[in-house]
Image (cartoon, rainbow, N blue to C red):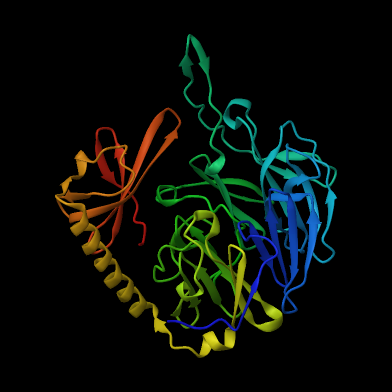
Amino acid sequence: MTIAAARTMKLPGSSELSLGWGERLALSNTSPDVTHVLDLTKWPPPSRPIHGFFASSMTRSKSGRVFALGRHHHQNPYRLYEVDLATASVTPRPLHAPWREPLSAFTVGDRLLLVPGGTLRVNGFRPSWWRESGDIEPLDLAPPALPSPIEHQGARYVMPDRMDRVDVIALPDDEALLIWFERLYRIGRDGVTPLALDGLFAMWEPLREGRHGGFDDRGRALAVIDDVFLALDRDGNFEPASPGSWPVKGAAPGPDGVWFLTADESLHVVFTREREVLEVDLRPMRLAPRMSLFMPKATWVPSRDAVLVTHSHDAHEFDLSTLRAAKRVSFEKHAKQLASSRRSLWNRKVKAAGAPIALDALSQHTRGGGAVEHPTYGVGAVTHVSEARRADALTVRATVLFEDRSRSFVFAGDRWAEVAPDFA
């Protein structure tokens, strides 16, 4: 459905890294380093710049304190700061850690959890609670397996770990789920509890932007994991929280059980209590070319009961009363519409791919494209293939779009095996 935005404006900086909480929106840009803090209570929102400050990771505690990892009038390494969004002031905070620099910051209730950068597995560094004194308290986690050394010209090297295998998802009661190098834990004031990762890791990829904490009416955490909007309980069990508005790039909570999901060129307004969905087409806004860094992002503005959609250097605001009055569809009908759209996409891709090959003949180095034939599911179009080195093994994952649904496979041993459903 095409719904015109009530207001539009140009942003003072790009929304590549934008983080919104209530009536404030922070835009952190580099080259040159500057962070703009927008006051969303007014239109157009006035902006206060923080010159020389760039945040690579920013998080907000339960009591409203905002912490950031970044640089302020100096080069790397990044340091820990507290940011007052009301006054746009930055205060350095002490951090006494044996790390070269912290990489990511997460809040669990009013506690700050820092993840170090560098060669984690080799040096034994672990995510740690931060204390006001600057001291840290490492989590009691099982040590991850060391990566295999690489030999080059007679010397042996251990390559640094990819840090995108760490993520934290807030839970009620000041707890959180921690994904730490292919293991799942529940962390809280009572310590660390190992959980079964099961199918979650097979579909998990980290969210590279600010994560909005939110829960459903059953007390489950709501999060975007590998383009799917999921509800997760404290034991790591999960299920889709919406009828598969695929692919979801971001999620933001609104009032009264309303959630705003953003995709490449659309905004999905999900009414979780009524189990209804409104899909708003964003293409008339002439979005910039699709880039993973510039996906549309949504922020609820309480003072005007509106949703602000930011994309690149533009902002579009929709009145929530207009969205509530628009025609919605039920979860069930929306799922059927998605299935129909998926079949149309499958038909186009298969026709353009040429003669299919057997799934087991799929090259590990294919980056998408082509068609394969599965003995049970029939012909499918390959939409994505990715590689990841975990421990001492190279894992290759492929996503194949069949007529009924999208399915995921992993190259195990010498053949492709199906892994957990991706709910697409």
Q: Is residue 66 left or right of residue 380?
A: right
Camera-side residue: 249 or 61?
249
Most distant residue in the top direction: 154
Q: What residue is rendered at 53% in x and 85% in y?
A: 323
Q: Quadrant of residue 138?
A: top right
Q: The C terminus lies in which quarter of the figure?
A: bottom left
For residue 289, above or below residue 95: below
Q: Residue furthest bottom?
A: 325
Q: Position of residue 104 (x, y in %)?
A: 65, 46
Task: Identify the residue at image location x=65%, y=41%.
Answer: 127
Residue drawn at x 76%, y 35% is 97
Is residue 52 found left or right of 157 in the rendered image? Answer: right
Q: Is residue 96 visible?
A: yes
Is residue 213 depicted above or below 72 in this figure?
below
Residue 39, how many percent across, how many down?
A: 76, 71
- Let me know if residue 220 appears in the view: no
Q: How many marks?
A: 0
Q: Residue 23, percent across and down? A: 73, 73
Identify whether 296 is placed above or below 366. Answer: below
Left-right relation of 86 to 170 = right
Asked if 311 appears above or below 350 in the picture, the reply is below
Residue 111, percent from left and from top: 73, 53
Q: Residue at x 59, y 67 (%)?
A: 214
Q: Left or right: where does residue 172 sit relative to residue 88?
A: left
Q: Looking at the figure, which quarter contains the N terminus?
A: bottom left
Please name whichever residue, 413 or 138, is drawn nearer the observer in this view of the structure: 413
